[in-house]
Image (cartoon, helix red, strand yellow):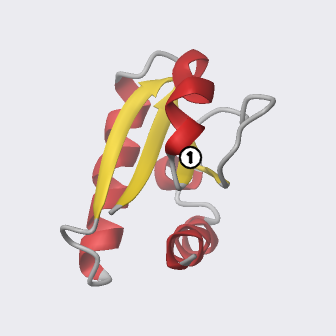
Amino acid sequence: MKKIVVACGSGIATSTAVEAKVKDLLDNNGLSGQYTITKCAIGEALSKCADADLLVATTAAPAGISCPYVSGVPFLTTIGKAAAEQQILEALKK
């Protein structure tokens, strides 16, 4: 089971939008039931990512993050979305 952390400034607004789009991406690529997603504020990301496989955040990755990071901004703007989707899929193959 892969653990994904989705973070934004408050852990409420944009992380919810990104979470839905990441779920759609994973489910459409045959990964349904093979992952969990935890939402949080970026201030909590360091501790939440201690055992995570991936961080998707709408802010910069916090210093000291121990898992791969993918920017969630493309899921909000659609600019660079295909590349971000590919990064997520590649990170979860490891």
Query: How many residues crowd around disc 1 within 10 Å: few (fewer than 14), some, or many (20 or more)?
Result: many
Which amino acid lies under the numbered mark 1 shown in the image of this protein?
A: Leu
Q: Looking at the figure, which quarter contains the N terminus?
A: bottom left
Instruction: List x then y, in percent, for residue 84.
Output: 59, 65
Judge whether residue 14 can be spotted in this image: yes
Residue positioned 52% across, 79% down in the render: 93
Judge whether residue 72 can be spotted in this image: no
Among all residues in the image, which is located at the extreme left? 33
Residue positioned 63% across, 73% down in the render: 83
Q: Seen in the image, is 64 located left or right of residue 78? A: right
Q: Seen in the image, is 31 located left or right of residue 79? A: left
Instruction: List x then y, in percent, for residue 59.
Output: 65, 32
Nearest the viewer among 36 and 78 is 36
Nearest the viewer among 53 and 8 is 53
State the image quarter where residue 27 is shown.
bottom left
Helix, strand or loop at label 1? It is strand
Q: Looking at the figure, which quarter contains the C terminus?
A: bottom right
From the image, tell me which residue sits under label 1. Answer: 55
State the image quarter where residue 74 is shown.
bottom right
